[in-house]
């Protein structure tokens, strides 16, 4: 007979302390309750903690103006504002947003006041082309002006370089930002 211990009849094997602690933690990938304030409206969800802000906006809030381009943070089509700063929503987890307000292209214009000056400038300067990347371009362009990087075409090109336009509307986009910069300063 060996010296190994055998459980006595009717006893339950002990559960290691680490296993007990792990089972007490919430499922890190299961649905998490979260709140988002998008374009001034409050939304409450139960989402997988791995859900990107882009997918939360498109699939759960129903705002499809923000586009999924490369889904790797390289094209800028998914640019939105979080707490007034531009972010790539495909690289931002929805849980990371916290209580900071989110603004999408749908929330850029203020009610009945008409289009935002940047939206109007993109129309005036034909900076739209196919339009798929236009929402991200406009959101970055607004941030470019607010950040103080729209004083000359070289700065505009540099600070808009994270947004691609496969239709090559770059000269029109620079012209639109220069036009809107003046209108935004007056607003």
Image: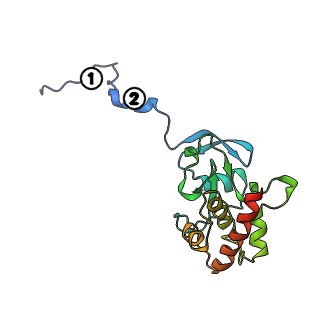
Q: Are marks 2 and 1 in contact (CB under 8 Å)?
A: no
The answer to which image quadrant residue 47 occupies is top right
- Please name the residue shown 59% across and 41% down the image: 98
User: How was this image coloured?
Assistant: rainbow
Quadrant placement of the N terminus: top left
Crowding at dot 1, Cα within 10 Å, few <14 / some 14-19 / many 20+, comes out as few
Whole-number angstrom distance, CA of label 2 to CA of label 1: 24 Å
- Residue 138 image offset from top left, x and y in percent: 68, 65
Give the residue number, with chain letter if any, for mark 1: 7
Q: Nearer the viewer, residue 124 or 185?
A: 185
Q: Which mark is residue 143?
A: none
Crowding at dot 2, Cα within 10 Å, few <14 / some 14-19 / many 20+, comes out as few
Up/down of 158 relative to 11, above or below: below
- Please name the residue shown 65% across and 64% down the image: 141
- Please name the residue shown 56% across and 44% down the image: 95
Q: Which mark is residue 21?
A: 2
- Residue 37 image offset from top left, x and y in percent: 69, 44
The residue at the far right in this view is: 112
Q: Secondary structure at mark 1?
A: loop
Up/down of 122 relative to 22, above or below: below
- Residue 166 image offset from top left, x and y in percent: 61, 78
The answer to which image quadrant residue 13 occupies is top left
The answer to which image quadrant residue 135 occupies is bottom right
Residue 54 seen? yes
Quadrant placement of the C terminus: bottom right
Residue 55 seen? no
Q: Secondary structure at mark 2?
A: helix
Q: Nearer the viewer, residue 59 or 13?
A: 59
Is 116 positioned to the left or the right of 163 in the image?
right
Up/down of 20 relative to 51, above or below: above
Upstream in sequence: badge 2 or badge 1: 1
């Amino acid at each position: 007979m060996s010296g190994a211990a055998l459980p006595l009849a009717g006893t339950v094997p002990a559960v290691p302390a680490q296993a007990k602690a792990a089972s007490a933690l919430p499922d890190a990938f299961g649905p998490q309750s979260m709140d988002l304030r998008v374009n001034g409206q409050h939304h409450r969800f139960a989402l997988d903690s791995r859900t990107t802000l882009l997918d939360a906006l498109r699939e759960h809030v129903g705002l499809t103006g923000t586009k999924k381009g490369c889904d790797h943070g390289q094209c800028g089509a998914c640019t939105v504002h979080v707490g007034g700063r531009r972010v790539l929503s495909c690289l931002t987890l929805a849980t990371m947003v916290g209580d900071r307000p989110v603004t999408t292209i749908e929330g850029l214009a203020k009610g009945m006041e008409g289009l935002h000056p940047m939206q109007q400038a993109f129309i005036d300067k034909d900076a739209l082309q196919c339009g798929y990347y236009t929402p991200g371009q406009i959101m970055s362009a607004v941030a470019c002006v607010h950040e103080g990087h729209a004083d000359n075409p070289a700065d505009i090109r540099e600070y808009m370089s994270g947004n691609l336009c496969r239709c090559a509307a770059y000269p029109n986009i620079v012209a639109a930002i220069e036009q809107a910069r003046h209108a935004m300063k007056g607003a």
